[in-house]
């Protein structure tokens, strides 16, 4: 793909790529992602990012606080699209950064990087509204099939989007999976995208209708068998932007402040330095003129924890 830096500058101004540019981007990204294993090995220092969900101005705020690639290495744990007003710009920029700086930027698949989910929660409709047809949506959702399923930092930290699976005890089992297809409704790939930690021990039925809940005994066993110190994951709204679970052997990171423009939560990124030294950086929503999204839509801020979100 030519003129990548020009395209990055264009996106940083919240100007979407045209459909030809998206086609070239997705072609280049597919070739880059084919080289990545199901579990991508990442070396510190790296900054880990949770859900973004189409909140583009907040993504720019994240880069303002955390630094831009390639000066900062990034691991994005998925859910670039849906719910926010700028899914097209968010996913275009994150994918473009991966193509431009493949050794500095890692992008994983989240449960929203799926054809079915994006037809319900906004990305499909946004693509049709901005481009007049579903071609760009199809280009990106076809690309999503090639995103890695998880990452490992310094061989000591496991990073899936969602959580663990009763079908997967080792990293080798994840490496053996065939990932180049839509996220299935059940099975190990589904579990990696959808599962959540729980206070109860063992495996439980997830209220999301996909994946499982898993207790601290499950996390401890998985970490012990694979030589990990802890798990870092995204997928769940946490009001302070990050939250420790399971005796500080699992941390959730959520990087979309004031989620859905009404939840009132902080966002966070996690900076991982050599020796697995962690620094959590919290941030609030980026300022918006007139207190709205730029689309004439009023934004509400609630101080209370919202109802359960997909």
Image (cartoon, rainbow, N blue to C red):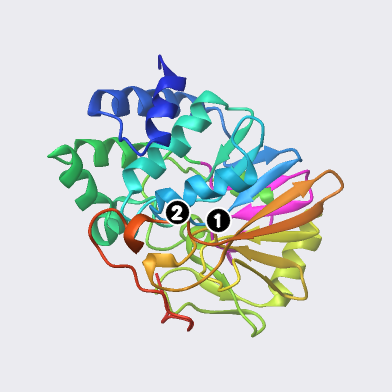
- Density class for disc 2 (Cα within 10 Å; few <14, some 14-19, many ≥20) is many
Is 282 positioned to the left or the right of 114 in the image? right
Q: Identify which residue, 189 or 6, lies in the foreground.
A: 6
Q: Find residue 241 and report its image quarter.
A: bottom right
Instruction: Please provide the residue range marked out in magenta.
Output: 148-170
Residue under the point 70% across and 60% down: 231
Residue lying furthest front in this view? 290
Q: Residue 183: percent from the left, percent from the top?
A: 39, 53
Q: Residue 65: percent from the left, percent from the top?
A: 62, 48
Quadrant where the N terminus lies? top left
Q: Which residue is mark 2?
A: 79
| Disc 2 + disc 1, Cβ < 8 Å | yes
Is 163 positioned to the left or the right of 152 in the image? left
Q: Find residue 69 and report its image quarter.
A: top right
Q: Is residue 253 visible?
A: yes
Secondary structure category for the residue under label 2:
loop
Q: Which residue is mark 1?
A: 50
Secondary structure category for the residue under label 1:
loop
Is 50 included in the stretch rendered in magenta? no
Is 88 positioned to the left or the right of 285 in the image? left
Residue lying furthest right in this view? 275
Q: Residue 261: percent from the left, percent from the top?
A: 38, 66
Q: Is residue 80 visible?
A: no
Q: Which is the main secondary structure of the residues drawn in magenta?
A: loop
**Mark number, residue 274:** none
Q: Residue 39: percent from the left, percent from the top?
A: 62, 43
Residue lying furthest top in this view? 2
Quadrant where the C terminus lies? bottom left
């Amino acid at each position: 793909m030519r003129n990548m830096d020009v395209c990055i500058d264009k996106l940083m101004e919240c100007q979407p790529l045209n459909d030809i540019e998206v086609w070239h981007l997705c072609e280049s990204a597919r070739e880059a992602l084919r080289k990545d294993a199901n579990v991508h090995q990442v070396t510190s220092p790296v900054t880990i990012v949770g859900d973004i969900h189409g909140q583009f101005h907040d993504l720019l705020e994240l880069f303002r606080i955390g630094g831009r690639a390639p000066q900062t290495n990034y691991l994005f744990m998925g859910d670039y699209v849906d719910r926010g007003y700028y899914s097209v710009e968010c996913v275009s920029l994150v994918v473009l950064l991966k193509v431009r700086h493949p050794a500095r930027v890692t992008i994983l698949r989240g449960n929203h990087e799926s054809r079915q989910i994006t037809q319900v929660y906004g990305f499909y409709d946004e693509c049709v509204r901005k481009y007049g047809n579903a071609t760009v949506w199809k280009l990106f959702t076809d690309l999503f099939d090639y995103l890695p399923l998880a990452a490992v930092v310094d061989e000591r930290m496991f990073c899936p989007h969602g959580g663990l699976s009763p079908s997967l005890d080792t990293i080798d089992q994840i490496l053996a999976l065939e990932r180049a297809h839509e996220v299935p409704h059940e099975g190990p790939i589904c579990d990696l995208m959808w599962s959540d930690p729980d206070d109860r021990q063992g495996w439980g039925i997830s209220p999301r209708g996909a994946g499982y809940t898993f207790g601290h005994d499950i996390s401890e066993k998985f970490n012990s068998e694979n030589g990990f110190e802890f798990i870092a994951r995204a997928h769940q709204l946490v009001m302070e932007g990050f939250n420790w679970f399971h005796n500080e052997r699992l941390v959730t990171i959520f990087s979309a402040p004031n989620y859905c423009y009404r939840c009132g939560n902080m966002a966070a990124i996690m900076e991982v330095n050599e020796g697995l030294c962690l620094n959590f950086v919290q941030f609030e929503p980026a300022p918006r003129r007139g207190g709205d999204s730029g689309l004439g839509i009023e934004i509400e801020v609630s101080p209370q924890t919202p109802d359960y979100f997909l």
